[in-house]
Image (cartoon, rainbow, N blue to C red):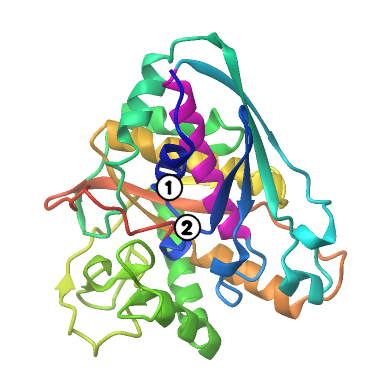
Amino acid sequence: MTISYEDLRRIAAMAPSILNTKPWSLSKVAEDRYELRADWGRSLEVIDPRHRELIISCGAALLNVRMAIRVTGHDLAYSLVPSEQPEDDECQHCKARGRRTPGLLASVEISLRWIHPATEDEQRLYEMIPLRHTVRKPFNRKIDMNKAVELEMAARTEGVDAMVVHDREARRLLREAAEASRELAGDQGHGDELREWTGRGARVTEDYGVPQRELARQPKGRHRPPPVRDLGLAWGKAGERGNEDYEKCPHLIKLTAETDTPPDWMRMGQALQRLLLTATRCGVQASLLTQRSEVDDWKKAYKRTNPWWPSPRPWMAVRFGYASDPADPARDAGGTR
């Protein structure tokens, strides 16, 4: 049993991605080999200037491809491509700024001669791919510690650090996310690009972008930072999208990569998707908080010219819980936001 190229592309397209841009290209280069590349035509030059979240999105797509191949019974080997690549495979915007960002991100080789049945875990994760969905609704109940540990271990399988944060740390991360959101909201270019890919934006279609129905409602009151990313700031006046009472202190798991390089971003993307699929299998909803790291990337890309400026370990926070009115899992439009 094998899987067709078109089916692999369809399954890869169900991965979470930054603003649901699906910024990857999967190509078949031999009967037993595929290549995953960044699609620079769907990159976000202002919101994601270093393409960090784009490459994390590609890592999530790679995990989907791996699971789809494994359920056919075939083993596979994949390699993450180092950053040094020919100039014609790089982002030209990065090249103009004197940075090197690779286009070819991973190569996947399938063992067609040997059949090795998928494990129960691989089969279950594959079945969760079309059901995974970003939920920006209020969570009225936290997950228990046993499930939290299971989610931590799922992410660590892919070579990144994962840790449930305590309440004090969670509140600090929310404050930082809110501060970052205010800083990003003050940038005109950031707002224009966000408007293009959300709500009623020009790039929003049934397959791409975050439509109006997927935008989080605004929190009631302003006395504490909301635990969700408000992507609808450009759409409607205050209160037009309705208000919600969000949880005071969300249950967060923090993912941290070892270094700040494209291969580690690919590992973080795979860890993120394995964690999200595991959560879906457990009936747990999730959304992401990435504003703080976006501001760090934004400043580093545009305001830092010193090559010796230290690179912090990249991270993102994943919010988990149970919503009283879960989102319809039939279509994903949330991406890594």
Q: Is 117 situated left or right of 259 in this image? A: left
Question: Which three-letter amino acid code belongs to the residue tagged 1?
Answer: Ala
Asked if residue 201 is positioned above or below residue 176 in the image, the reply reads: below
Quarter holding residue 301 = bottom right
On the question of residue 123 being in view, the answer is yes
> Residue 22, labelled with which disc?
2
Asked if residue 104 is positioned above or below residue 176 in the image, the reply reads: above
Q: Is 170 situated left or right of 281 in this image? A: right
On the question of residue 153 being in view, the answer is no
Majority secondary structure in the magenta region:
helix
Residue 160, percent from left and from top: 60, 37
The residue positioned farthest toward the left in the image shown:
324
What range is drawn magenta here?
A: 52-72
**254 drawn magenta:** no
- Quadrant the C terminus occupies: bottom left
Q: Is 298 situated left or right of 237 in this image? A: right
Which secondary structure lies at badge 1? loop
Q: Give me the residue at 35% from left, 38% from top.
A: 129
Residue 156, percent from left and from top: 54, 31
**53 drawn magenta:** yes
Quarter holding residue 100 = bottom right
> Residue 15, labelled with which disc?
1
Q: Give me the residue at 33% from left, 63% from top.
A: 228
Check disc 2: other Cα within 10 Å, few if <14, some if 14-19, many if 20+.
many
- Quadrant the N terminus occupies: top left
Which secondary structure lies at badge 2? loop
Residue 40, percent from left and from top: 62, 65
The residue positioned farthest toward the front in the image shown:
31
Callout 1 touching callout 2 (CB < 8 Å)? yes
Which callout, 1 or 2, points at the residue further toward the start of the chain?
Answer: 1
Question: Which three-letter amino acid code belongs to the residue tagged 2?
Answer: Lys
Q: CA distance from mark 1 to mark 2?
A: 8 Å
